[in-house]
Image (spheres, rainbow, N blue to C red):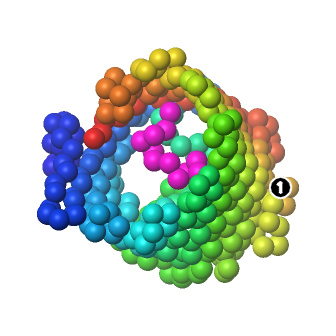
Amino acid sequence: MPALILLLLGAPISLELGGSSQLEVSVIGQLRLTESDRPGGASEVQVNLQRLRETLRLSTFDRRLAFGLSVNTTPAVQELIELSIEGRPAPWLRLKGGFFKVPFTAYRAQSYAELSFVDWATLVTRPFGAEHQLGLELHAAVESWTLVFGTFGGAPLRAAHGLGLAPSFGLATRNLANLADLGLPGRLHPELFTRVSVRFVATGLELIASAAIDLSPEEQRDLAFRAAPEVRWRGGPAEAFGVFYVGGPSSAPTQLKGGLVEAHLDVDDGLRLSARWSALAREPELVDASRAPKFEEERTFAMMFRVLGAQLELIADLAQLRQVRALGVVEEWRARAQVQGGW
């Protein structure tokens, strides 16, 4: 309830605590409507409060030391999103520890609130995408170069993204970040991450490469290896980027392949048009073992209306989803609309 009051009042809180310390409180909410038209003429409509996230950030020593806490408090699920401590021993160096999102791809490094679509490209982020784990991270930025290195527990505590092979095999996943079921996975195992990027300011181009190695993966669940090169470009009102994913178990490190391409055009300050294509392909041995589709793709078109800048946005998208299975092709249409408000 306090989060809803803050959201409705539009009242970001920033308190100076004396000296060089500061407390910042923010809240973002998303109300979503989804309609899916499935084969055979079946239609399903859902309306839900997708996210209601409150974030507290306490910084001190001129922001050289910060503590972060973020939770989600929708009626459907209350969960811990982040609990971290961050230090800046030098202007170009940041050290972070605790429970937070692993550094895999610049696409997932952005906030969900910055997306131009109703949600992430879950077709590729469910198996490959970064998710919240326990770990340590080093972030260094020198001129146009950025290097991120992290070591984490190897098992995502939130059951949303970065689930590896589990979705292919239809294995159940437990959301251990749920405040009603908070806990640790049965076996933590080291997973190493790195992400490196370089910007070419004159051309608006950025090249990024991410990689992760799980030193003790669980069979049919974890990807022993995954990599994702990215390219991003921005020029005037236009922006585009692409990500290519590859990963698999240690015996077959390229069993899964995925791709994501997005393009955006800012018509004016209040309207953005976007198009997205994402695809996921499985090698024959993985299809035979899991009975999962050998190919899936999603084509999505979106419009974003900035009613009050980033504080109040309306987003609508229309998607065609397609699966290629052993018995034929399955197609589905999905329409979504979302109101996002936050401060």
Out of 43 and 101, give the one closest to the viewer.
Answer: 101
Instruction: Identify the residue shown where x is 32% and y is 63%.
Output: 63
Q: Amino acid at mark 1?
A: Glu
Position of 136 with respect to 64 (left or right) is right
Is residue 111 magenta-colored?
Answer: yes
Position of 190 with respect to 211 (left or right) is left
Image quarter of the C terminus: top left
Image label count: 1
Image: magenta residue range: 104-116
Q: Is residue 73 above or below residue 327?
A: below
Instruction: Identify the residue shown where x is 51% and y is 70%.
Output: 137
Q: Quadrant of residue 91?
A: bottom left
Q: Quadrant of residue 16?
A: bottom left
For the question of whether residue 44 can be seen, the reply is: no
Is residue 279 magenta-colored?
Answer: no
Return the x and y of residue 242 as percentages of the image width and height. Answer: 69, 41
User: What residue is shown with label 1?
Assistant: 283
- Element on which disc 1 rests: loop
Instruction: Identify the residue shown where x is 35% and y is 38%.
Output: 30
Out of 218 and 130, give the one closest to the viewer.
Answer: 130
